[in-house]
């Protein structure tokens, strides 16, 4: 139906620096790829711009469903998903993302600028505003933990339940955390003011419950129900975020032109109708990953996210089912990465 369902003629895989590119349907690769800390999904929009892509958004929820489920199943607890689309395609797929455990965080608007449509609008026939935007919507994992009764709970409810099973009054959590009132006001509340407790606070509550709470075979605040509280594992229950001062949710970036734009073999036209600027991929990757982290690009196209990830010291895994796009992406990365080390994976 989309560019990811075109029959494969010559399945292949290549490694260029820290990027692993596959000429394959991503559904065949998710179980083989390492856990991602970031997924950049730039799949069909329902605009019929790619081989097999539908002309409307109606089929998108059913098409994306297996992919979204696989992402949730394989992603690391601290994974961030960037979902690209038009306003309508994203809105159509959002319920599928929510159903499979992806928590909506924010919508970033890519403003391509007036030059994107200048001279291409007939004011006598157009019946709306010219579109110069796409959206990149940020999601994180809705992580769940098992309580002492075997129930799966969101982190907010799980933290409170762990303190409650100690039998201790709520106000003593402040003493355990070494704060005036933050524990009861932020860490144990169930309202919108809830704040992810830092490791020091969690460790303080775990130790206090162990020393003063009701005797229990299951360690207090144990993430696996067996071992004592694990600070490193707790940190990974929250997605990474690196703030850039002055950056808002509107990203103004011209569409790709010049040397960055991949051309057709004759050098006349553009090979890919919607090649994303490397600058946007870099913003997304830097916001939610560290060096060495794994970035997935399941609908590779020309693999802009994988190129940016490799240049930033991350490990990238991409799939592209269209033969022409795949081979162009391999060549693009081979030429861009220094030194270009191309090996069959």
Image: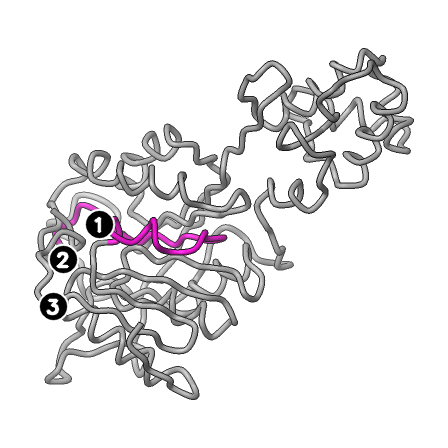
Residue bearing mark 2: 50
Residues rendered magenta in the picture:
26-48
Q: Are marks 1 and 3 in contact (CB under 8 Å)?
A: no
Q: Earlier in the sequence, mark 1 or mark 3?
A: 3
Q: Is residue 131 left or right of residue 211?
A: left
Residue visible at 35% across and 68% down in the picture: 20
Helix or strand or loop: what does disc 2 sit on? Answer: loop
Q: Are marks 2 and 1 in contact (CB under 8 Å)?
A: yes
- In space, the residues marked 3 and 2 are separated at their CA atoms by 19 Å
Q: Report if residue 33 lies within the magenta region.
A: yes
- In space, the residues marked 2 and 1 are separated at their CA atoms by 8 Å
Quadrant showing the C terminus: bottom left
Q: Relative to 165, is 222 above or below?
A: below
Helix or strand or loop: what does disc 3 sit on? Answer: loop
Label 2: few (<14), some or many (≥20) within 10 Å?
A: many
Label 1: few (<14), some or many (≥20) within 10 Å?
A: many
């Amino acid at each position: 139906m989309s560019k990811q369902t075109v029959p494969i003629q010559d399945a292949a895989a290549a490694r260029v620096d820290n990027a692993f590119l596959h000429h394959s349907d991503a559904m065949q690769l998710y179980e083989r790829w390492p856990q991602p800390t970031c997924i950049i999904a730039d799949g069909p929009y329902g605009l019929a711009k790619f081989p097999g892509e539908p002309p409307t958004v109606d089929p998108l929820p059913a098409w994306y469903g297996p992919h979204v489920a696989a992402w949730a199943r394989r992603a690391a607890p601290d994974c961030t998903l960037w979902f690209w689309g038009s306003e309508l395609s994203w809105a159509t797929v959002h319920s599928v993302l929510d159903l499979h455990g992806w928590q909506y965080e924010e919508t970033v608007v890519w403003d391509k600028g007036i030059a994107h449509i200048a001279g291409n609008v007939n004011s006598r026939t157009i019946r709306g505003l010219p579109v110069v935007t796409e959206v990149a919507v940020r999601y994180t994992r809705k992580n769940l933990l098992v309580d002492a009764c075997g129930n799966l709970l969101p982190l907010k409810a799980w933290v409170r339940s762990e303190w409650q099973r100690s039998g201790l009054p709520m106000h003593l959590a402040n003493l355990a955390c070494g704060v005036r009132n933050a524990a009861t006001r932020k860490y144990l509340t169930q309202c919108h003011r809830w704040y992810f407790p830092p490791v020091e606070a969690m460790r303080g509550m775990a130790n206090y419950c162990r020393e003063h709470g009701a005797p229990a075979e299951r360690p207090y605040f144990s993430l696996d129900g067996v071992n004592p509280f694990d600070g490193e594992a707790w940190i990974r229950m929250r997605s990474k975020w690196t703030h850039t001062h002055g950056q808002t949710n509107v990203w103004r970036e011209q569409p790709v032109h010049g040397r960055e734009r991949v051309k057709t073999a004759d050098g006349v036209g553009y090979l890919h109708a919607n090649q994303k600027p490397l600058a946007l991929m870099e913003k997304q990757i830097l916001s939610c990953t560290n060096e060495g982290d794994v970035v997935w690009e399941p609908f590779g196209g020309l693999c802009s996210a994988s190129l940016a990830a490799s240049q930033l010291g991350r490990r990238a895994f991409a799939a592209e089912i269209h033969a022409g796009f795949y081979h162009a992406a391999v060549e693009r990365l081979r030429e861009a990465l220094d030194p270009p080390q191309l090996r069959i994976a």
